[in-house]
Image (cartoon, grey):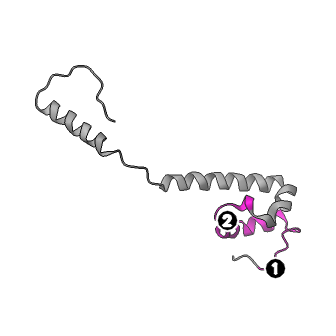
Amino acid sequence: MPLPSDINFDTLKPEEFERYLPDLFANGNGKVSEDPRLVKFLGEHPDCAALVNDLETIAEHARSLFQTSADPSDKVWQNIQNKLQQGSLGHEDDGAEPELA
């Protein structure tokens, strides 16, 4: 349900807030707690504020799952390749840990 343009956020009831919450998240880039229209409401309704905090935390962690991490440097790949070649050529293991960076 899209957010009605005539919402009075100062007189919003918790059940109305919950009904509008998905749209508030969609329109607020996931940061409902930073919406200036909701400062008074969230201050007066700590359960709703806690719900928003929990949902923002979940959304933040979910976004981090989709962020790509940097690939290891070329030097790391070269060291791996060198160690593999040494192992396949029958070189003795000197017991030292392989250097990857």
Q: Is residue 78 magenta?
A: no
Task: Report the residue marked by disc 1.
Answer: 6
Percent position (x, y) of residue 38?
80, 63
Which of 89 and 78 lies nearest the eye of the viewer? 78
The alpha-carbon separation of the residues under discs 1 and 2 comes to: 18 Å
Q: Which residues are magenta?
A: 5-34
Q: Amino acid at mark 2?
A: Phe
Q: Quadrant of the N terminus?
A: bottom right
Q: Residues within 10 Å of mark 1 (few under 14, many from 20)?
A: few
Q: Is residue 73 left or right of residue 13?
A: left
Task: Report the residue marked by disc 2.
Answer: 25
Which of 35 and 44 lies nearest the eye of the viewer? 35
Q: Residue 86 appears in which quarter of the rendering?
A: top left
Q: Residue at x 60, y 54 (%)?
A: 60
Q: Is residue 14 left or right of residue 75?
A: right
Give the mark, 1 or 2, whose residue is nearer the N terminus.
1
Numbered disc 2: secondary structure: helix
Q: Are marks 1 and 2 in contact (CB under 8 Å)?
A: no
Q: Residue at x 21, y 33 (%)?
A: 83
Q: Residue at x 41, y 49 (%)?
A: 70
Percent position (x, y) of residue 63?
54, 56
